[in-house]
Amino acid sequence: MHFDFHFTVVQTLWMLTFAAELVLLVVLMGRDRIKRYRFFTLAIALMALRLLAIKLLGGRLPELTLTTVFIVLADISAIAGLLVVVEMARRAFAPVSRLTWLAWTLGVLVVGGVILWKWGPWPAWKTLETNTFIGELRLGQMGAQKLDMLVDLLNVELGVLVVLLGRRFGAGWKSHTQRIVIGLSTASIAQLAVQAIWLRIARNTIPHTQAEYDHVIALRDRFFNANGALYVAILIWWIVVLWMDEPGAAASEPANDKMPIAAAGGVSEQ
């Protein structure tokens, strides 16, 4: 029997990503992880909402209304991503004194901000008109893009710090916090790498024929699809590791269960 599925790579990645995000949300709720990772849960829910909005609203709303919805969701998601970085940093380095934590936070922000500024491109401030609705939308879109890139840079920096110093402060390899951070930093590294490669290709490639143009676009799509496939793998990784309990939490329950048994045994012997 032969099954013929007419799904493109983009459609397949959309379905896998959306399904994995829903399963991850179920795991976060079912395993009671939301209390510890509220902003991480919010960020996953917002990404699922954006995917659903793209699928349901695309082509069904006026272009301006659709663009406004997508830009607003992108801005909210970018802010949620920044809150996730703060949440993970606080979880990973909870024993650190407040002064040390603030100093390290300032250093990480400075490094990320400098890289973001040098990365570019930045439009001239005179061209950013905010006296029209279209100008406000463009400003909101640029803000979402730049904040997303800053979050990616911060995720990479936090991942390096957690891998190097996490065990010393209680966020070792088997902890949920370190595994979430490793997934975030891996996704951010891939995202930054794809952006850098595509930016270099776009700057140094001038297609002279339609075939050359189609080749460049196909190459871009391959990079983006590979990045999407990696994100699906990271979602599956989070589903598995967040389903399992941390070693410390698993070990504490049997110890508590033995106390009533021992006490009951002592009463019967008397």
Image (cartoon, rainbow, N blue to C red):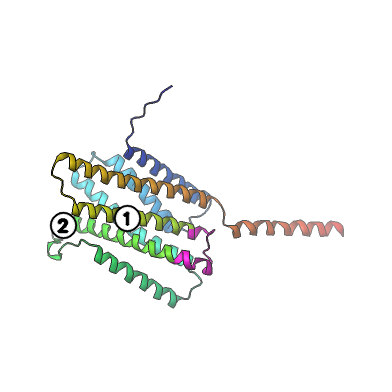
Distance of mark 1 from mark 2, alpha carbons? 30 Å
Residue 159 lies in the magenta stretch:
no
Q: Main secondary structure of the magenta part?
A: helix
The amino acid type found where label 2 is placed reads Gly
SS class of the residue under badge 2? Answer: helix
Q: Quadrant of residue 76?
A: bottom left
Residue at 34% in and 33% down: 7
**Figure check: 221 above or below 190:** above
Q: Toward the viewer: 251 or 52?
A: 251
Q: Residue 193 appears at what percent x and percent y?
A: 32, 55
Residue 255 horizontal side relative to residue 224, left or right: right
Q: Residue 78 appears at what percent x and percent y?
A: 32, 58
Q: Which residue is mark 1?
A: 193
- Mark closest to the chain's N terminus, 1 or 2: 2
SS class of the residue under badge 1? Answer: helix
Q: Which residues are magenta?
A: 161-178
Residue at 44% in and 58% down: 182
Q: Which residue is mark 2?
A: 135
Residue at 38% in and 39% down: 15
